[in-house]
Image: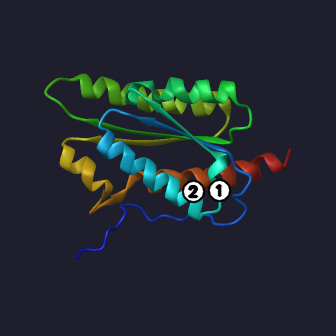
Amino acid sequence: MEKKKNLSNIFVPNTDNANFKIGIIVSMWNDQVTNALKEGALTTLEEAGVPKNNLFVYDVPGSFELPSAAAMLLDANEDIDAVICLGCIIQGETRHFEFIAQAVANGIAKVGVEYTVPVIFGVLTCNTAEQATDRAGGKLGNKGVEAAASCLQMLHTHKRMYAKR
């Protein structure tokens, strides 16, 4: 059996994570893939010491809705330290894929800059469903795991930067 390997070298900070409150926004479109991403993220965060009751999971219809849902969550709850956005956009026969992928990437980046908190891009943009499956717990790892690791790394960076104030 082939060992599953993530595409990136993942460092997950495993100390001092118990007080972080993290929102996870998950697209329901391509839900077989996005549910696997969500499970990977949740498992990674819990294993790193983030309590389950500090994880707030919300579903949205598609990836296009991820940025606005992240902003709504941050507006509604000042205690949220970071947001992970998980989605899957698969190339179709039209240019719709390009517009959605670019809008989602730009929107997620904008929310992070506006709120000055980590907002993590955990959105697969694949040419085929097979590529998406490979990156959602398949032979190339799980982008949800990578997004959770990035989130924790960014939270620790954020904490160090703001500690100097």
Residue 70: x percent and y percent? 56, 30
Dot 1: element: loop
For the C terminus, the quadrant is top right
Residue at (48%, 26%) from the top-left corner? Answer: 107
Residue 136: x percent and y percent? 33, 52
Query: Disc 1 vs disc 2: Cβ atoms closer than 8 Å?
Result: yes
**What is the distance, in whole Å, between disc 1 and disc 2 at their CAs?**
5 Å
Residue 33 is labelled as: none
Does residue 124 appear in this view?
yes
In the figure, residue 62 lies in which quadrant?
top left
Q: Residue furthest right?
A: 165
Mark found first going from the N terminus, 1 or 2? 2
Residue at (30%, 44%) from the top-left corner? Answer: 32
Residue 45 is labelled as: 2
Side of 7 where 115 appears, left or right: right
Side of 33 where 103 appears, left or right: right
For the N terminus, the quadrant is bottom left
Side of 122 where 56 appears, left or right: right
Q: Which residue is mark 1?
A: 50
Q: Residue furthest front?
A: 53
**Badge 2 amino acid:** Leu
Instruction: Depth check: give the residue in front, 112 or 85.
Output: 85
**Badge 1 amino acid:** Val
Q: How many marks?
A: 2
Dot 2: element: helix
Q: Is residue 135 above or below residue 78?
A: below
Side of 56 where 37 appears, left or right: left
Does residue 118 appear in this view?
no
